[in-house]
């Protein structure tokens, strides 16, 4: 890759020395007694899956804590500027995903001008009218972040920002507590149920679970905002396409489990943004128009293919339903076993790190499936709040709780629309909305 690996390694060595020194210093400062807190449910990761899991358990009566390593919610979607809430419908005018996923899709409507496509704004129209657009939403990050925090606080969730997990203590095949810190403050979080919503199965791996390493194929995305001379802000999605067009595959094929590749990937994103902006301004100049300037860039890794749970438990009950964002027609079930960690009796995973077949990962990683898995995990955690194991959880009680909270799990939702003829629907390109 032509991104100065030698310079990068030299800088990394200097950074490593600084980090090592800082670690020694902080260890002394955090060497005193840590704060011990107890909950029914602890969620690690404040992306959409973590928010959904926290909401579900708190609303079901469980004392819930959410730990987020940054200072806002939404993760890749909000901080990474991937601001499309993908479809809740099958593309043939039929909604298939309900509950907290729909609540979060419509949440920014309270704080911004964002509205769902077409007739989905009010969910009124004929089948043909609803089929003309997918039930999705392009939203702005700020209103979504603020709205999610309001929902959590109103539900009674305790949110810890700027909080990094340091380790996990196990007892008899279950998590006893999670150790974390915020600045100089150390904390021990105890609970009967835990949810790993880190997006990379970080907690599950620390517990000894088998994970699939982040794979190659991560390309720079680089959605970013620009501002014109009138101080009007708009989004550009061209940086990723610019990189695809101008750089060979080997220069944009980053591994999701490599420290070096992950850092180089973000540098490539920044480079692509600069080059795309320059190309856009050349076009505007040729048309006699004023240039636009970079206003905001992603502040969160835009790498998609990170590590995930290698295998879950028995498939068991269907706890969610979601569609394929890439094409109209396919509808898929979410099985509770995809969330369970066989080696840890009180841990679930939620979001893009759940167990799934490789070919399904590109669908599972998007917001409808992430939120559905989060709601299922949070609902299960509330049932497990007073003890027990997920292996012994009453699946009928779990499904009943989900149905009572607005989720629809009707078998007919999994039956493809008669108009769908298989793979004859043109796939949409990611980044086009």
Image: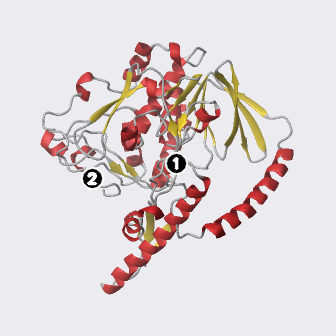
**Residue visible at 78% across and 46% down in the picture:** 184
Q: Is residue 21 left or right of residue 344?
A: right
Q: Residue 65, how many percent across, how many down?
A: 61, 33
**Residue visible at 70% across and 36% down in the picture:** 167
Residue at the disc numbered 2: 428
**Residue visible at 74% across and 58% down in the picture:** 16
Between discs 2 and 1, the one toward the N terminus: 1
Q: Is residue 87 left or right of residue 152?
A: left
Q: Residue 405, how many percent across, how many down?
A: 40, 25
Question: Is there any visible trace of residue 288 in the rendered image?
Answer: no
Q: Residue 22, how many percent across, how many down?
A: 80, 54
Other residues around mark 2 within 10 Å, as few (<14) / some (14–19) / many (≥20): few
Q: Nearer the viewer, residue 401 or 208?
A: 208
Residue at the disc numbered 1: 75
Image quadrant assignment for residue 31: top right
Q: Secondary structure at mark 1?
A: helix
Q: Secondary structure at mark 2?
A: loop
Q: Quadrant where the C terminus lies?
A: bottom left
């Amino acid at each position: 890759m032509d991104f100065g690996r030698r310079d990068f390694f030299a800088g990394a060595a200097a950074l490593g020395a600084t980090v090592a020194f800082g670690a020694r210093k902080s260890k002394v400062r955090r060497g005193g007694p840590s704060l011990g807190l107890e909950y029914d449910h602890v969620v690690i990761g404040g992306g959409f899956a973590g928010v959904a899991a926290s909401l579900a358990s708190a609303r079901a009566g469980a004392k819930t804590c959410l730990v987020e390593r940054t200072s806002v919610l939404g993760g890749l979607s909000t901080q990474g500027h991937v601001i499309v809430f993908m479809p809740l419908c099958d593309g043939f005018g039929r909604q298939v995903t309900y509950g907290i996923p729909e609540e979060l899709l419509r949440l920014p409507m309270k704080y911004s001008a964002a509205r769902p496509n077409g007739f989905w704004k009010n969910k009124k129209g004929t089948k043909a009218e609803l089929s003309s657009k997918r039930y999705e939403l392009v939203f702005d990050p700020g209103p979504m972040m603020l709205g999610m925090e309001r929902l959590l606080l109103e539900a009674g969730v305790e949110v810890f920002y700027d909080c990094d997990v340091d380790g996990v203590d196990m007892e008899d095949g279950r998590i006893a507590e999670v150790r974390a810190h915020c600045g100089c403050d150390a904390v021990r979080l105890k609970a009967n149920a835990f949810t790993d919503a880190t997006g990379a199965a970080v907690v599950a791996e620390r517990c000894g679970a088998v994970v699939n390493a982040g794979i190659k194929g991560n390309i720079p995305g680089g959605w970013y905002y620009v501002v014109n001379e009138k101080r009007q802000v708009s989004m550009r999605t061209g940086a990723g396409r610019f990189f695809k067009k101008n750089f060979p595959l080997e220069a944009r094929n980053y591994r999701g489990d490599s420290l070096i590749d992950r850092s180089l990937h973000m540098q490539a994103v920044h480079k692509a943004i600069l080059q795309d902006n320059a190309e856009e301004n050349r076009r505007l100049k040729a048309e006699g128009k004023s240039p636009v300037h970079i206003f905001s860039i992603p502040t969160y890794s835009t790498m998609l293919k990170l590590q995930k749970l290698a295998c879950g438990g028995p498939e068991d009950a269907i706890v969610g339903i979601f569609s394929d964002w890439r094409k109209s027609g396919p509808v898929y079930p979410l099985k509770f076993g995809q969330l369970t960690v066989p080696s840890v009796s009180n841990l679930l995973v939620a979001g893009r790190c759940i167990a799934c077949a490789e070919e399904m990962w590109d669908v599972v990683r998007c917001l409808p499936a992430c939120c559905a898995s989060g709601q299922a995990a949070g609902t299960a955690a509330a049932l497990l709040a007073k003890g027990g194991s997920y292996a012994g959880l009453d699946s009928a009680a779990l499904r009943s709780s989900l149905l009572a909270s607005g989720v629809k799990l009707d078998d007919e939702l999994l039956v493809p629309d008669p108009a769908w003829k298989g793979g004859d629907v043109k796939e949409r390109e990611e980044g086009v909305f």
